[in-house]
Image (cartoon, rainbow, N blue to C red):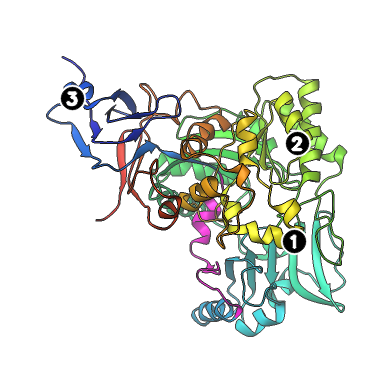
Amino acid sequence: MAVQADIVLRNGPIWCGREEGVVAALAIFRDKVLAAGSEAEIAPLIGPRTRVIDLKGRLATPGLNDSHLHLVSLGMTMGWVDSKPEAAPTLEALLDAIAARAAQSKPGEWILSRGYDQTKLDVGRHPRREELDRAAPDNPVMLVRTCGHIAICNSQALRLGGIDESSPTPQGGLIEQENGRLTGLLAENARAPVQAAIPPATEEDIIAGIERGGRYLLSLGITSCMDAAVGQKGGFGEIAAYARAKRDGRLPVRTWLTLLGDDGRSIVPQCHEAGLISGTGDDMLMIGAVKLFLDGSAGGRTAWMSEPYLGEDKTKGVWMWEDAELERMVMDAHVKGYQLACHAIGDAAIEQLITAYEKALAAHPDPDRRHRIEHCGFSTPAQHARMVKAGIYPCPQQVFIHDFGDAYVEVLGPERALPSYPFRTWFDLGLKPATGSDAPVCDPNPFPNFHTMLTRKTWKGTVMDAAQRVSIEEALQAYTEYGAFSQKREHVKGRLAPGFLADVAVFSRDLLTADPADILNDTRCDLTILGGEVVYERAP
């Protein structure tokens, strides 16, 4: 008796991959794709128990892979005060939201908020310590900028962190003062004392965050993700939390874990001791790469540039490590068998990272290690040539152009800002760029990301170098096959071919023919299949 499919999708289009193209029907058996083809070819696989899903002209694609986000942070910050521009477009609205949370909180309870962008606030500047003091006089407050690299703290939070006007600035950090007084702004490593004063997340908090964030991803058609700095919230205990979440059926999405590797907070020694190196695990939960932070964010003026930002201070951003320190950490992880996926946005940080990767690969060759440059925002043609030669891959988030492009123009000027995140260039060089959201930096909603890849437009409508646009098929390839490639799983997922994992997203319209504005403003995920099971259906 012939195998009968568990699920058949029909009346497509079904986009199976760049090579495979579009078919009209798809058959799934257990957790794999059984066959793809015409309705006539798939019809014999339909049996009495087969669930037949009529697409009614909607587009099905491989499940999306957000190849750089922070799943634990995404889930946990969903309970914080929302200070994103959509929720708090003005400083007054932001302070009102914090005051409202303070009114519901006990004195001394921490109030945490994330999402503001000073370039989008009506006042055009960061909130100030005194303003947060007035909004929440009896509570410590930490307000995190959208990029996650800058925090504004009120007086109580600074006091609990032991930070005052005499505190020394740590390497790779900034404690801002004006006229000899703290403004409340802490950048990069300077935030650590305040973060240490916040009650630590319990294992249950972390698992709840994984579950909440993962369910949200499924509702967007995202079936795979990379958690970009495991260990930031709970140290090595986050590994246990992930393992328990998987065991207890509370891990909704396939997750590729990137281990925090920075000196002083690295979980790599414990992971290596436990035998947890790149590739350990299975397709639901796998140890991925090691993450080091080399700089900050461009919009926050902390990405490390070779030329100064605009403004009087002549800052070139924040750099984290001396060359020798970085090269030692990269070499150590490389020798231990890890892929590396390090944060570098500014051209100076990218230069430092490529050099460290080249030295590790020269000393211990591995032609397919696939070390990654996370974000890689302001890379240069000379750096691209070295990346191609060494097999180093960019892992950008094109939605940054949508959300932050205008801020880049403001802090760097158009000549340097417009060609940032050069997606078309990377495609043409064969560097197989993936894409993602860096959530909770940006919302993981894929439609602004698609819109930017197609148009290079910011939320304001500024076109950031039209020559870097890609086609919808290329955008889908970045979100699926290249996401899988970035995790060395391109033979397992990212395409709808026989034997591949049956991860499928169904969208409310045909993205292949849709106007980019409609993709941005009026498209939803209707259905998500993970491993052959329907895990999300949008309510009609």
Q: Please tell me which of labels 3 and 1 falls first in the chain.
A: 3
Q: Answer above or below: position of 80 versus 328.
A: below
Residue of label 2: 381
Residue 176 spot, x, y in % from top left: 80, 69
Residue of label 1: 411
SS assignment at label 3? helix
Front residue of 25/223: it is 25
Q: CA distance from mark 3 to mark 1?
A: 58 Å
Q: Is residue 79 magenta?
A: yes
Q: Residue furthest top?
A: 1
Q: Answer above or below: position of 297 versus 393.
A: below
**Picture mark count:** 3
Query: Image check: 539 left or right of 490?
Result: left
Residue in the image at 81% along x and 45% along y: 348
What's under tag 1, amino acid-wise? Val
Q: Which mark is residue 43?
A: 3
Residue in the image at 69% along x and 30% along y: 392
Which contiguous range is marked in magenta?
Answer: 68-91
